[in-house]
Amino acid sequence: MATPVRRDDLDALRGAAILLGIVLHASLAYFPYPWPVQDSRQDLLFGLTYALIHGFRMPLFFLLSGFFTMLVLRRRGVKALLVGRGLRIVLPLFIASLTILPLTRVAIEMAVRQNMAATARRSPLAGSILAGDRDGVRRILAATTTGVPGRDDATGITPLTLAAMGGDGEIVATLLDAGADLEATDRDGSTALYAAAFMGQADIVRLLLDRGADEAARAPGGKVPHDALLVPAEIASRVAGFLGLSRRSEVDIDLGRESVASMLAPRSPPAAAGGMFASVAAAYHAALASPQWRVECAGRSWHLVQTDVFEHLWFLWYLCWLVGAVALAESVGLGPTGRRRFWLVPASCLPFALMWSPFGPDTDLGLVPLPHLLLFYACFFWFGAGTYAGGGLDATLGRSWKLMLPLSLLVIFPAAIVTIGNPLLAATVQPAYAWSMSIGLIGLFHRWLSRPSAAFAWLADASYWMYLAHLPLVIVAQSLCRDLSWPAPAKFLAVIAFTIVILLVTYRLFVRFTPIGWLLNGPRASRGPADRC
């Protein structure tokens, strides 16, 4: 009997984990999230869907990547591993950075222009704020008998927050004089003071404090306005752009935040949100956000940790680091083993405790990986590598999937949602959700998809191309659907269908049997049943 050369079930699961990323990005327009497209119809259930997928998808992907990395390493050696991963990961990342990522940025700019127009149509007051039209703001407020409007239906933010982020003190004062509520919260539970601190608008923070804003007001996740200073300035700049505000440079935001810190720190120190634990995390993130990481290159300022370089392809950059680490460890006799891998499960809680995101792992931006995020994914990657080292292709991980999946979905996931905002519990429960879902899905796929299937193998191969190329299509489809009167779920499904169909057709016609397909998946010399469908 021939020795098996692949695990079809794990190939299918890895492809599914990649494709879930398309579902994830398609959902972001339909609940409050800093995303280029803010749809006219919102449904908070999509936020729950996002959490459900985001909480385990990337940990599962890195676990499987570690397994397959060890497979290649043990069968072909270190040199073959590095050459193969260079062709399959490094080169596609470089080419995508010159092709797909610029297309993504074009799609984002088009979506932002539509955002501005849509916001002005929905709310003339918001349109005047975006345009910096002070007289227009006064006229609209003078003509209304109902006071300052509340949150915008699509963006979920108040006019006061929009003006505070924009930095026009005269407009902010006009809104306050007209009765705008200082403590009114946006859909995410934050106030205008938090938003102004987030954008480094020092003059606005001073104005709001003078008018009586509460510097200790906490969002549902427990964060106070001072905590907004720890969010990467690059994210703040992007959010401003998504909303249609004048996009401030990251350097200006950092400079403004230095002044804001001097106003807020004495009254709302980070430790107030969670004791010494939160204080350590805040100090860590402050070190990552330090301007000392900023360099000047190619006529612009780059923050090595925070400036977005790879967009949605950051995970490929992380794979480069992790593959290199395993290859180095194997070369010196310290490679992964089956016996010493289960300690990685509790160990993953330590880097997770430093996550900034309220739910699930952070998303990376910069050229220098976030240390806590790299270590968190390294736990899963090394575990996957150790699983292969201990059992080869016959590894029996996931045998208890009938118990583990219901436990994960019905007990651990709800507990993870309930404990958002509690740093200690979240650092335990959320990694437990990622591990239990990952291992449970491995067992489920082994039970039902362990036999070779031409269709699933074809889709697993296609998934890499589909994820590389999907984001511009998703953003374009979301923009086309933005102002339709359809329910949010119908728009979401339309975005998915539009994107998937185009990606499958382009893969079949222009990728699979071309040099691109060879680069992504290796040679495909013959056309199987799935190709003839």
Image (cartoon, rainbow, N blue to C red):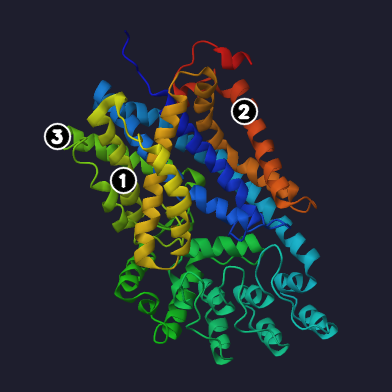
Q: Secondary structure at mark 1?
A: helix
Camera-side residue: 363 or 291?
Answer: 363
Disc 3 + disc 2, Cβ < 8 Å: no
**The quarter of the displayed image where residue 279 is located:** bottom left
Between the C-alphas of marks 3 and 2, the distance is 43 Å
* Visible residue check, residue 367: no
Q: Secondary structure at mark 2?
A: helix
Residue pictured at 72% horizontal, 47% vertical? 491
Q: Position of residue 99 (x, y in %)?
A: 56, 37
The residue that mark 3 highlights is 333
Q: Position of residue 95 (x, y in %)?
A: 49, 35
Q: Position of residue 222 (x, y in %)?
A: 45, 73
Residue pictured at 69% horizontal, 48% vertical? 489
**The quarter of the displayed image where residue 473 is located:** top right
> Pointer 1: residues within 10 angstroms few (<14), some, or many (20+)?
many
Camera-side residue: 303 or 475?
Answer: 475
Between the C-alphas of marks 1 and 3, the distance is 18 Å
The residue that mark 1 highlights is 378
Residue pictured at 67% horizontal, 46% vertical? 492
* Visible residue check, residue 48: yes
